[in-house]
Amino acid sequence: MSTPVEQTLIEQSRAGDLDSFNAIVETYQGQVYAVALRMVRDAAMAEDLAQETFISAYRNLNQYRGGSFKSWLLRIARNATLDALRKSQRRPAESLDENIVAFEAELVSQEATPAEAALNTELGDHIKDVMAGLHPDQRMALVLIDIEGFSYEEAAGTMAVSIGTVKSRLSRARGRMREALLADPELLPSRFRQVSEGEE
């Protein structure tokens, strides 16, 4: 549900108060941009999609019927990114675990040696490449839950599907990432290499 302050901003925005809508933009622009960037992997395109999302949201505020405003807004962003992927003819093939996805954010360490830093950079690029190969619906589930920290309920609202569908898409995405990354185990940190070796 929207907070009382957020609901007030929404009502004022509906009445044409741009300052109120700018306050909404400031609250969510980072998250909208991050989701778009994870989906399209192009900073300029992600910026355009974020702007398009907020323009569309402003024009369609009367269609917001309550519930999670963040989910409603990110559903607009999701639709915009999928449209952009189709228009640019980027159609990832349909065909890791959550902790493998999570360590992308901690790959660059100030204590890392030059060799370790180079390996971490290569691993980060590999993770992004594997994510790019996921079906957009699977990638969106992975981005929202494992990277943005959404609950299953929030992700379901954003993707306009059931919680069961979100869980299914997330499971497939994690499985595909795990398979792809464990196929190149020398890039993984030692604790994951040991796990993969133990599974053989």
Image (tube, rainbow, N blue to C red):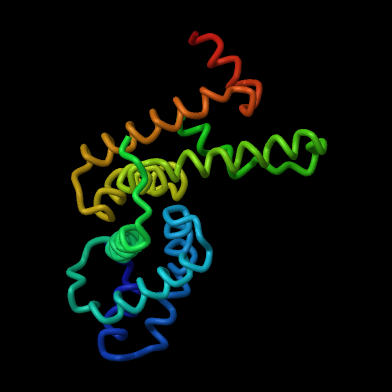
Question: Where is residue 174 drawn, in percent x and y?
Answer: 40, 32
Question: Where is residue 140 drawn, in percent x and y?
Answer: 36, 48
Residue closer to the observer: 47 or 148 = 47
Residue closer to the observer: 72 or 190 = 190
- In the rendered image, the vertical position of residue 197 relative to residue 9, given as above or below: above
Give me the residue at 30% from left, 46% from top: 137
Quadrant of the drawing holding the N terminus: bottom left
Location of residue 52 (image quadrant): bottom left
Q: Is residue 69 visible?
A: no
Give me the residue at 53% from left, 63% from top: 43
- In the rendered image, the vertical position of residue 102 relative to residue 45, given as above or below: above
- In the rendered image, the vertical position of residue 88 relative to residue 197, given as above or below: below
Q: In this view, does 196 lie to the left or right of 163?
A: right
Q: Which residue lies furthest to the bottom in this view?
A: 16
Q: In this view, does 60 lie to the left or right of 136?
A: left
Q: Can residue 4 be seen in this view?
A: yes
Question: Where is residue 112 drawn, in percent x and y?
Answer: 78, 37
Label total for image: 0
Location of residue 69 (image quadrant): bottom left
